[in-house]
Each structure stands twice: as C-alpha cells, then as structure tokens.
Image (cartoon, coloured by chain):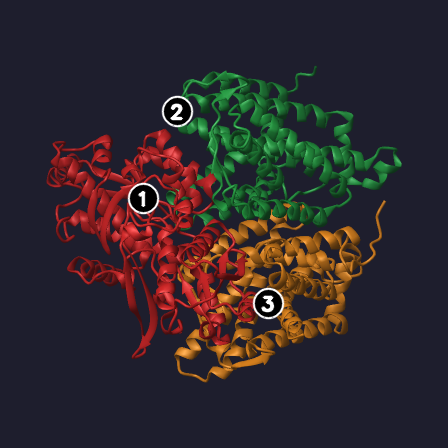
Chain colours: A orange, B red, C green
Amino acid sequence: MFDLAAVLFDGVVYSSWLFMMAAGLTLIYGVMRILNIAHGSLYALGAYAGASLVGAWLAGGHPPAASYALLLAAALLVGLVMGPLIERGLLRLMYGRDEVVLLLVTYALFLILEDVIKLAWGVESLVVAEPYALPGNFRIGKLAYPVYNLILIGAAIVIGLVVAWGLYRTRQGKLLLAVIHDREMSAAMGINVARVYVFTFTIGAALAAAGGALTAPAIAVSPGIGVEVIVLSFAVVVIGGLGSLGGAALGALIVGIVRSAMVRYWPEGELFSVYLVMALVLIARPKGLFAAPEARKI
Amino acid sequence: MKRALCQFVAAAFAALLAAAAGAQQPVKVGIVTFLSGPAAGPFGVPARNAAEIIAESINAGRVPAPYATKGLGGAPMELVIIDEAGGPQKQVAEFRNLAQRVDLVIGYISSGDCLAIAPVAEELKKLTILFDCGTPRIFEDASYKYVFRTGPHATMDNVSAARYVLERRPNIRSIAGINQNYAWGQDSWTDFEAAMKALKPGIEIKTSQMTKLFAGQFGAEISTLLSSGADVIHSSFWGGDLEGLVLQGAPRGLFKSHLVVLSAGEPAINRLGTKIPDGTIIGARGPFGPFAPDTEFNRWFRNVFQERYGVPPNYASYKMTNAMLGLKAAYEKAQKAGAASPNQDQIITAFENLTYEGVGGTVKMTLGKGHQAVMDVAVGTAKTVDGELRIVDVKRYPAGEVNPPDGVKSEAWIRSGMKAK
Amino acid sequence: MTLDRTTTTLAVAAVLLLAAAPFLPQWLVFLLTLALAKGLVVLGLVVLMRTGLVSFGQGLYFGLGAYAAALVGAAAEVLDAAVMLAAAVAGSAGLAAVLGLLLARYRDIFFAMLSLAFSMILYGLLVKSSALGSTDGFNLHAKSFAGITLPAGAERRVFYAVAVVAVLGAAWAVHRYLSSHYGRLATAIRDNELRVEYLGSSVFRVVFANYVIAGALGGLGGAFAALAVGHVDPETAYWTTSGEFVFVAILGGTGNVLAPFLGAAIFEAVRTVANQYAPNVWQMTLGIVMLALILFLPAGLWSLVARLRSVAR
C-alpha cells in the first residue's frame, strides 16, 4: 500500500518539474508556432541564476528561509531579461519566414547560450544544497522524503493556477488565447500581436527558468543539463496538445507516474517510458489529449 | 633605410632566439579531452589543466628527477588541444585532421572514442596514447602497435571495490546497484556483480537501477533502493549524476541504511567535501588523489597544480600527467639507446613493456603485449574529521590481484575467481 | 532524357571526384566520403521536407543502416562492402515501409515527435544490448567489394569511389523523381493537402512513398558513414544526430538536390574550423555563423546559388 503511495508521490514530483517546462513551451508554440529548442538553455540559465543568487545570499550570512523566494526571483529575472532580449533581438528578425527556419534559429541560439553559460559560470558544477536539506524530511511508510519535494509540487500547482488565471481571466490572457486560436484573425481584429509575442515568450522563458531554479538545490548544476530537458518537454507538449495548459499538466502527470512505476517495477523499461506514452497517446488521439478542434482551410 | 635596418635587427634577433632555444625541433602533441558538456567539469578540464602545467614544467626542466631534463630529451613540447565532444564518428574525423598537424596524440576519456580511434591510429601509423578510458576491450579484443594506454583499465576499480567490501563486511547478503545506463555504467555493474558472486557465492541481487545518463534527479530510483533492503549499494556514477545522488540520497538516509560504494567517486571529494556521509566507500580508479603515497614527487605535483588552479588534482589530472611522463620516459630511453632525435618507431620500441615512475605510483606497461599499463589500486572510506573530509581505512591492492593476466579477458577472469598471477 | 543544369553538375562532379580518387590525400578521402554519406541522409530529408514533413527521426535509419552493415561483417562474417550496403538499404527500406504505414497519417510536430520516438526506441535497444557493445559500439572493416578483394590500404578509396557513384546517382534519381508528376505532388501536398485529394491523387501514397525513399537513403548513408569511420555506435540513432540532419537540410534549403551536399559541406567545415581555432567556444561560433547565414539567406544556402545562376543568365 505504501509502496504504491511512494510510486505515486515520486511520479507527481517528477510531473511537477516536467509541467513547468512543458507549460512554457506549449504557450510559446501555441502562440508563436515556434519550436523553441533554446527552452533547454533557459532551464539551465534559471538553474545557474538561482544557484548563484542563493549561493551569494547564503554566503553573505543571510537567513536561509528566504532562499525559496530568491529562487523564484531568479527565475523571474531570467524570464524578464532573456524573454524580450531573445524575442525582440533575434526572433523578430525572422518572422514571416518558414516555420522550419525558426527551428534552426532556436537551435543556433541554444548552441550560443550553452557556451555563454560555460563562459559565465565555468565548467565546474554549482552546488547549493541548503534549501533542499533545510526543511527536513517526512515519511510515507518506511521511506523518508525531503519536504522540499512538497514545496516543489506546491510551487508547480501555484504557478499553474496563476498562469491559468492569467490566461483565462485577464484581458491580456484572453488576447493570448485569441492569438493561439487564429493569428491572422486576431491581427485583423486589432490585437497587437507583436506585443502578445513578447509577452508570451517572456512568460515561457520565466516558466522554463522556474523549472531550472527550483530543481537547482537538489542537483549539481553543471553544463549540459539543458539538453535532455528539450526532448522531454516537447514530448509532454505533444501528448497534451499544443497550446493547452491543461494538456501540459495532464501530459506531465501521466509521463511522471508511468516513469515512476517503471523505475519501481520494470527498470529496464524506464528509457522508453516517455516515448511509449507519447506513441500510445498519438495513436489514440493524433493531435494530443486536449487538442482544440481546428477549422481547415481549403 | 630605417625600415631595412629594423628588418635586419628583427631577423638577427630571431636567429639568435632560434639558436638559444636549442637545436631541437618542438614535438607537437595533440591533446584530446572534453572541453564542453557534462564530462568537462569532472574530467576534461582537470585533464587539460594537468596537460598544460605538466608540459610547461617539463619544458622548463622543473619536474623532479628522473624527469629533470628540459623538454622531451631537449625537444620542447607544443600542445594542440581539441574538444572530445561529439561522439565517436565526429572524433574519428577530428583525429584524422589532428593527425596531420601533430607528431603524436594523447587523449580520450570516453571508451567509445577510444575503441573507434585505436584502429584509425593504427591505419594512420600515428603514435596515440590513451590516458583515461576504462574499457578493457581495447587490448583484450585486438592488438595495436601504435596505440598505448598509460592508465589502468576499469576492471580493477570494481574488483578492488568488491574485495574491500567483503573484507570489511564479510556477512553481507545482498547488493543493489545504481549506475548510468551506458557502457561504463553497465560494465562497472557487471564487473562488480560478477566479482561479488565469485567471492561470495549465493549473494542476492536486490535491484539494478540503470539511470539515463545525466538524468541528474533520482527521486524514484532512491525510493526503490531504500525499499530494496540491500546491504550494499554500488554506483559508478560520476559528475553531476554522482553529486545528485549524494545530495538527494544522503538527506533521505540512503547512506545510513546501506553501505554505499562509489567506485569512481574520488573527484566528488573536492566538490562535495563533508557532504559525503561517513562510511561511504570511495575508489579513485587507481592510486590517485587522496590515495597517492606521500612522496616528494607527489607533493611537488599537488603543489604545482594547486598553485596554478586553486584546487587539488583529481584522478583525471593524475592520469594525464602519467601519460606525459610515460612519453618523456620512453623518449629519453630511446635517446639512451642511441638515437639523438628518436623517430616514432624508436619511441614505440622504448615504450613497450616500459616501467616508469608516475604520479601516484609505478606504472608498468605489462598487459596488451606491452601496450597496456597496470598500477596498484587503493580503496578507502570517507570520514569527516575536524570539519574536513578524510579518507581513512585505506587498503592497497597490488596490480596482480586486481588485473587479469595478459591474454586473459577480464570478464572470464572475474568469473573464474580472479586468481592473482 | 533532359540534360538540365542539375544533371550536368552531378555528372561533372562525379567525373571529377572519381578522377581525383587515386590522388587525394587520405584525410580528404575520408572527409568527402563522410560528407557524401551525410549529404545522402539529408537528401532523403529534403524529399520529406518538400512534402511538408520534418522528420526528427532520420537517425533511426542512419543508425540501422550503420549497424546492419556492421552486423553483416560481425555476425554473418561476410566482409563484403557491397553486401553490407545492400543489407543496409534493404533493412532501412523494409522498416520504413512498416513504420510509414503509421507515420504517413501524421503531420507537423506530431510527425516529427513520433519519428523521434522511434529513433529513440532503436537507441534504447542498442544501448541495452551489451552484445552489440552498448554505447561503446564496435568496429567494422570490409575486405572486399562485390566479391573482388580490395588491396590493403586502398579500401577507403574504393568506398569513396563507390560512394561518389552511389550518392550522386541517387541524387540524380531523386532529381528525376521530384521533377516527375509523382514527385511534384509532394510540393502540392505541402501547399494544400485537401486540394490534392479533391483532384484525385492519394496523399497517403505519396507521403508513404517519400517516407520510404527517405528511409532507404538514410540507411545507405548510414552504411557509407560506417564504412568510412570503421566504427558504429548508438549515437547515430540519438535525437541530436537526427536534429543535425534537419539543421543541415534547413541550412542548405530544399531548392535542389545539390543543396543538401552544399549544406553538409558548409556545416562540417564550419564545425571543424571552429573546433580547431576556438576549441573552448566552438558551439557559440557555430551558432553565430548559422544565425548569420540564416539572416542573410532565408531560403538556405542554395538560394545563393540560385541567385547567382539567375544573375548569370
């Protein structure tokens, strides 16, 4: 019984982390139709920025309790800086081009950012473990889990709710939904699509950075952590349906729990778990779980 | 007029410099190691740093005896450093490029790269010294004339770890493993499991977790290990994965309720320090780092490295250094045999079956028909003393006890009981 | 048979490359063989991209072709390069025919991700197999070609020559295919699938055929690459390898069958030079160069050639 609870809990922890990555990516793809390969670099930037900020804070002898807020602040900072910088500085020059060309642009950006991170932070790993160990442990059956995992899950839920509220209840959010639904029509209706783009990219970047910053205390932040994240986030976005926040959440949940179950009961299969889920979902629902019905132009 | 005078002076100066530098042509050495990606931090860059400081020290004649002559028997070393990233196909292309620009190559951390490069080195007839990669297959599956490996291979890491564990806890009944799901992790676990079964038949394997390389987060895996009830947990993790395992496992009691063996854990000592829980068994893939004997030579090496780079050298730095020292020893031995400026074949003849003093201990090229090195190995236990992490309870194993004899494959040797030669 | 400019260029290139075969230095032989092999895979991708599909899983066929060639040598002990190449093409085309039945129904990012999923499944299987050396892979060497024993030391030149003929021949065949009625349906599908259906052609059949072609070309490219390098490893099936092919395809553009080779050559050249002169920041250098190229040449490198051609006219 507790075994199952442990598997579920591990799955949900993994899902929370995945959700933050996938949410940002699905928004960016939904609105701008850009497959943002640089999403992985934004994740890495968030992790490095969070680790550095908290590291400096703790080294200065300040209270560790504030480090959690600092992690989120670092993520927000990365989003606010990198979002407009990338969107206005680079992507704007490429609009109107083939979608596929933008893919190459984000890949080139990813390469550049990998080396920028290496130049800024070096190749040594960054370890900032205090926020992870500080809140102590709690138990599920015989197993000890860090309370930090609960914080992670809580943060993912809160962030998800905030973004959802922003998307469905505010005016700016509804404009974003309109652009996701039909870009040309929105522009024709007078929506400042360019501004929506910058806004979306910033939020997406901040979400990726938040995923990185919140993961940083549990890991050794080192070069290359952004690479694997890319494929995983894309898989979850595809499973959930493009541009759908709920889809990202459900997709992340499914992938996380399936993976956790495989680790426990069939470790050999863990390597394939995300691809298996994706293949099964796509065979059943070719456009993802929560794909909006699309009108086809003839 | 003034311009012609300047040119004349410049030419004369250059000529003087050339004469002063000695009559020897520089030896161009290609260095291939990870400069980007996750392997750069723990291995690639420490190895590059060692290459640079040692080449500098060799050229200046500052290395203690018996390496005190300047350069390689008088010829200065010039390094050409490239990145090992990109996978074996890319590295083969890079090697073919590099081979035209240098006289010999020292490099390769990844076993996949070593396996791909060795036949190419043979084809291009380019002296290549592999300094780190672990797979025993290089000289067990083939023989080479132009390829040498000055670092012992990975069989001894896990054989010595298994011996150490059973010597300290002879009554254990079960083991589990968490290793990275690629050749290194798979081979390490296979070796450890086979060694344990050979030394203590009837031992139970509770679970073998094979994690995705660079996954970094091991929540579910750690939960599985904690529920497994295994006595001993083996891991050949390195880099970010190793640090993640310690950071995530220690607070959950993984190291308290199990005896954890980190067969390649030495680089984490500098990185994590006292975060490594007491009682953790740590290997350094040889007599390196904290296991290096306290000789003057070793002290010189540690000091010169620490002074330049601010951190002590880890086993990647030690192994790169041994590659360079081996080259120097072979070169100078060839010189003593009569060639003032030895060519590649003469260096190769000198290198085969060579025994030389490396950092950490004696290096003997006794396997692989004289091309593969063996060294003694040491394993120890971590313990925090006065706020600093120390390695205590060190046990040394002579090379013969933890390496198969020449001509015998590692896997077969382990299964048959690891008889010392 | 029309002798348009592309055909003439291909023929001239083939003759020149073949004539130079005995004289080229070893490293150039290797580089050219690898460029031709990779260019072939990208060619297959270009066929798919003309149909409006981006496949992020060509690594599946690249890796399968490589391993098929290597296994013919290791397991069946047949060290004949021609048999290896045939096995690679047969295996890849066969698998593409099976997978194509499923994949031809998907579009856009779903097609991309599903193709990626299959390539990663192959990767996972290869990594798990310790008999195949897991991530270390294993070496292969071919000693004969179509029954003729190759002189020692000249094997790679022979592979190079065969590659020139095979690759440029395949490029010409694809060129003829794309100019044919069936081939032109590809671009029509990219523009508007529904209309093509209404006009009476089967979209599914065209997509399926193009997918199998891309798979077969990928497998052949993988086998040539394996012969040139002498080593196979699972990285050939990893998504970053597939991604690289996509990026080279975009870099070269889809305008002409010669474009993939131009793109492959430039990409390799920039990467090698960057690694040589800026080993610590080669990724950034490569990224910046690619961005610059994209900025000034939005339709890929081939648009530069096309522009020069039209100016010359």
Q: Quadrant of residue A175?
A: bottom right
Measured as percent of width and height from the top left, residue A193 is found at: 71, 60
Identify the amino acid type marked 2. Answer: Pro
x 75%, y 60%: residue? A179
Measured as percent of width and height from the top left, residue C116 is found at: 64, 47
Measure how far apart labels 2 and 3 are at the Cα level.
52 Å
Name the subunit of mark 3: A
Q: Are marks 2 and 3 in contact (CB under 8 Å)?
A: no
Identify the amino acid type marked 1. Answer: Pro
**Residue C25: numbered disc:** 2
Q: Are marks 3 and 1 in contact (CB under 8 Å)?
A: no
Measure how far apart labels 1 and 2 are at the Cα level.
41 Å
Secondary-structure class at tag 1: loop
Measure how far apart labels 3 and 1 are at the Cα level.
57 Å
Tag 3 and tag 1 share a subunit = no
**Residue B405: numbered disc:** 1
Q: Which residue, given by chain and number where applicable, does mark 3 sit on?
A: A206
The mark closer to the camera, 3 or 1, is 1
Secondary-structure class at tag 3: helix
Q: Are marks 1 and 2 in contact (CB under 8 Å)?
A: no
Q: Is residue B11 left or right of residue B185?
A: left
The mark closer to the camera, 2 or 3, is 2
Which residue reaches farthest front?
Answer: B202
Q: Nearer the viewer, residue B142 or A49?
A: B142
